[in-house]
Image (tube, rainbow, N blue to C red):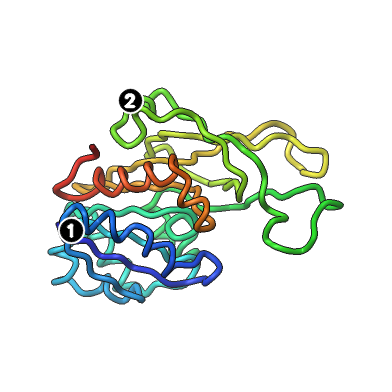
């Protein structure tokens, strides 16, 4: 299986270290891995045609028209596409074609009470639960996992109904926030795009979260499920 790892963008998500965590897993599965530090590779039709899986970790950043066209064409033709957190759900904010491909976009990660904030990234770290859906309890990516708790950024995601949600998280109503009822947001989802499969996991802000057994299982199984020739096991 040929895997393309594309990483870069905002350094706060540690794109190099984060993707390196999963290279041994791919190597153990006999994958041939190519690493690119730029989305420009999406514009190389010959590379994309032979790629079975793309693992993307590019937070924010920009993408050129030919690059997103190449990515969309590859996925529609059967190349799998997966990633976690801002590396896939907050990439290329200005590209509507990218947003349509992925089906969900980071909007916010609500924080602590203002008086409890100290001015660093932990202001946005909240305890929350990732809850499997009925589909998630049967799907190869998440079957056998239970609901699990994390203390990290809790993503609020804008999404469409073409995604198949395997797990959700609920943002509660707090006195310092302007919304008036709990908001259920997808935390793990899949998406069929042409002949290709897409898998998104919103947990993954930091290396310790990626090492969480449940998060890591979702990401690793998701790679296998999304790949052109693979299936989760």
Q: Quadrant of the C terminus?
A: top left
x and y percent of residue 19 in the render?
38, 63
Relative to 184, say whether 45 is above or below.
below
Residue located 43% across and 53% down the image: 84
Residue 119 located left or right of residue 144: right
Disc 2 packing (10 Å; few <14; some 14–19; many ≥20): some
Q: How many marks?
A: 2
x and y percent of residue 166 in the render?
41, 34
Residue located 36% across and 61% down the image: 56
* SS for dot 2: loop
Between 93 and 166, the one nearer to me in the picture: 166
Work out how far the residue at label 1 is from the one at label 2, CA to CA, in angstroms.
Answer: 27 Å
Of the numbered discs in the image, which one, if any, rests on residue 120?
Answer: none
User: Which quadrant of the view contains residue 172?
Assistant: top right
Relative to 39, say whether 232 is above or below.
above
Between 57 and 71, the one nearer to me in the picture: 57
Of the numbered discs in the image, which one, if any, rests on residue 138?
Answer: 2
x and y percent of residue 151 in the render?
62, 45
Of the numbered discs in the image, which one, if any, rests on residue 31?
Answer: 1
Q: Quadrant of the N terminus?
A: bottom left
Residue located 28% across and 63% down the image: 71
User: Is label 1 or label 2 in front?
Assistant: 1
* SS for dot 1: loop
Relative to 147, say whether 219 is above or below.
below
x and y percent of residue 38 in the render?
35, 76
Relative to 63, say whether 51 is above or below.
above
Residue located 36% across and 33% down the image: 142
């Amino acid at each position: 299986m040929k895997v393309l790892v594309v990483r870069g963008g905002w350094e706060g998500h540690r794109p190099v270290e984060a993707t390196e965590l999963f290279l041994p897993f791919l190597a153990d599965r006999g994958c041939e891995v190519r690493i690119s530090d730029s989305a420009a590779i999406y514009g190389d039709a010959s590379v994309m045609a032979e790629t079975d899986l793309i693992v993307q970790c590019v937070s924010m950043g920009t993408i050129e028209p030919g690059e997103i066209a190449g990515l969309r064409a590859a996925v529609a033709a059967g190349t799998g596409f997966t990633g976690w957190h801002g590396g896939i759900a907050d990439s290329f904010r200005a590209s509507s074609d990218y947003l349509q491909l992925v089906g969900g976009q980071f909007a916010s990660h609500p924080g602590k009470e203002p008086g409890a904030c100290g001015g660093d990234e932990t202001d946005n770290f909240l305890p929350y639960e990732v809850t499997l859906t009925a589909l998630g309890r049967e799907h190869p990516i998440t079957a056998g996992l239970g609901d699990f708790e994390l203390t990290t950024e809790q993503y609020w995601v804008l999404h469409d109904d073409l995604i198949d949600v395997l797990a959700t998280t609920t943002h509660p109503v707090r006195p310092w926030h302007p919304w008036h009822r709990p908001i259920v947001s997808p935390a793990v989802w899949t998406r069929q795009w042409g002949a290709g499969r897409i898998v998104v996991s919103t947990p993954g802000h930091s290396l310790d979260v990626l090492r969480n057994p449940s998060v890591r299982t979702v990401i690793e199984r998701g790679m296998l499920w999304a790949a052109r020739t693979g299936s989760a096991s």
